[in-house]
Amino acid sequence: MALQNSVIPFTGKLGNLIGYQRNGKFFLRSMPDMVRQTASTRRAAHRFGMASKKGALIRNAFYDDLDIRCDNGHINRLNKVLIAAAGNSAAIAGFRFNQHTGIDRFFTAAPKLFKDDTLHIPPQALAQHKAITALEVKVIAVRIDFTTRRVIDMETVVMMIDNAHEPFAGTNIPLNVEGKGTLLVALQLRGMQKNDPSCNRQYVAADIIAVKEPQRPKSLKKVTNPRKSILRPEIALNLAYTGMYQPLIQRE
């Protein structure tokens, strides 16, 4: 591993060298002469590739509407969650785009998504921070079809809590995100200092707070007649040996 000191660093493959970025710095490493993969490493590589594609789709769906700076490790953190989830998208709930601060730094009672796609923020006393006078609340809801890898629809709602030092009365925010697919809801909070949002990463948060999978059609069950009974030959034979069932013997 070597640090790139050139004026224009690069990422990707160049001859037998690979350039990559980590924590804001650019490095170089050489390609191995031979790569041997076992069945386990191939399966692991496949899982990583699937998680990376899904993670990129989720991140890009939210990036344009996020007003905060994500931490440098959020890409790897999201991929790690998706790999561990093994296809269960609900495991994404609770993911932080800014690992330094979560919405629980401001809200003492967690928001909840109702079945009718209404986001309920319960009444509560807000956590107090001396430098924060107000709180900006932004809801970003996106519907993603992971099968076709498309963002179907999205909606953004912004509201302001004018006085962060008084109890919050609570609110319900209806979300109208059309189409079929998985609904992901992110909540962004920014502490306001006078009239400007704080630039301190300790006072800005953006968490995925809810994931709602599309409803699957109910399978039709075959209706059988419980009164109808068939005596199978092997059962009849067993009953004959126990004397409970007497076979008919025709006389000559």
Image (cartoon, grey):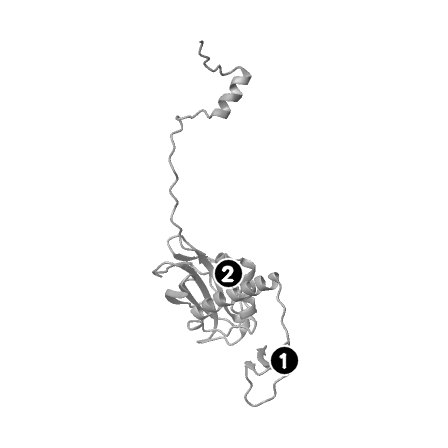
Task: Residue type at mark 2: give it.
Answer: Ile
> Gap in Å between the C-alphas at discs 2 and 1?
35 Å
Residue sitting at 38 percent across and 30 percent down?
225
Q: Is residue 130 visible?
A: no
Asked where in the image residue 186 lies, by quadrant, the reply is bottom left
Spot occupied by residue 211 in the image (x, y as percentages of width and height)? 45, 58
Amino acid of disc 1: Ser
Q: Secondary structure at mark 2?
A: helix
- Residue that label 1 marks: 30
Q: Position of residue 150 (x, y in %)?
A: 39, 66
Q: Position of residue 30 (x, y in %)?
A: 63, 80
Nearer to us in this view, 233 or 194: 233
Find the residue positioned furthest to the top: 252
Above or below 124: residue 10: below
Q: Which mark is residue 92?
A: 2
Mark 2 or 1: in front is 1
Q: Quadrant of the C terminus?
A: top left
Q: Nearer the viewer, residue 189 or 26?
A: 26
Of the two numbered discs 2 and 1 on the same chain, state the one appearing first in sequence. 1
Residue visible at 50% across and 61% down? 107
Give the residue drawn at x 63%, y 83%. Answer: 3
